[in-house]
Amino acid sequence: MLLPAAVALALCVAVPPAAAAADAPDSKVPPALAKGEALFNTNCSVCHGAGARGTKQGPPVLDKIYEPNHHADIAFYRAAEMGVRAHHWKFGDMPKIPGVARDDLTQIITYIRWLQKQAGIF
């Protein structure tokens, strides 16, 4: 059954903004990224903060400087596996992160890239 145009329009106008917002994309971490989030929280958040927002000990990776065209995934692997000298921040050199496997880093980087997309970095 088709609704008359006036009724359909009235329904669209009558929908409160809160109901429309409920249909907006959810920024909850997708289940496929839960392992990356947990690994990030365990190994990276001490310096890079909850949700990668940074701390007094380390920079946020939600900064435009860390988008993929400037810091490709290999830069994140290298930083965790080998450490990296300070070059975009005032926090000192980043030490290598012992005990984090390459597969774990893949999960972490995927999670970070998702956070960056949510933040509108790329």
Image (spheres, rainbow, N blue to C red):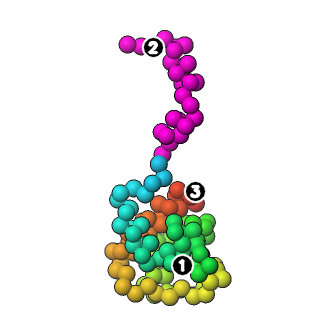
Report whether residue 70 is seen.
no
Query: Under tag 2, what secondary structure?
Result: loop
Residue 122: x and y in percent read 55, 59
Quarter of the image for residue 64 reads bottom right
In this orientation, which residue lies closer to the viewer: 68 or 20? 20
Name the residue at 44% across, 72% down. 41
Quarter of the image for residue 33 reads bottom left
Q: Amino acid at mark 3?
A: Gly
Q: Is residue 16 above or below residue 1?
A: below
Query: Does the magenta segment cover residue 5?
Result: yes
- Could you say which disc has been placed on residue 3 in the image? 2
Residue 94: x and y in percent read 54, 85
Query: Under tag 3, what secondary structure?
Result: loop
Tag 1 residue: 47
Bounds of the magenta segment: 1-25
Tag 3 residue: 120
Which image quarter is the N terminus in?
top left
Report whether residue 90 is seen.
yes
Crowding at mark 3 (Cα within 10 Å: few <14, some 14-19, many 20+): few
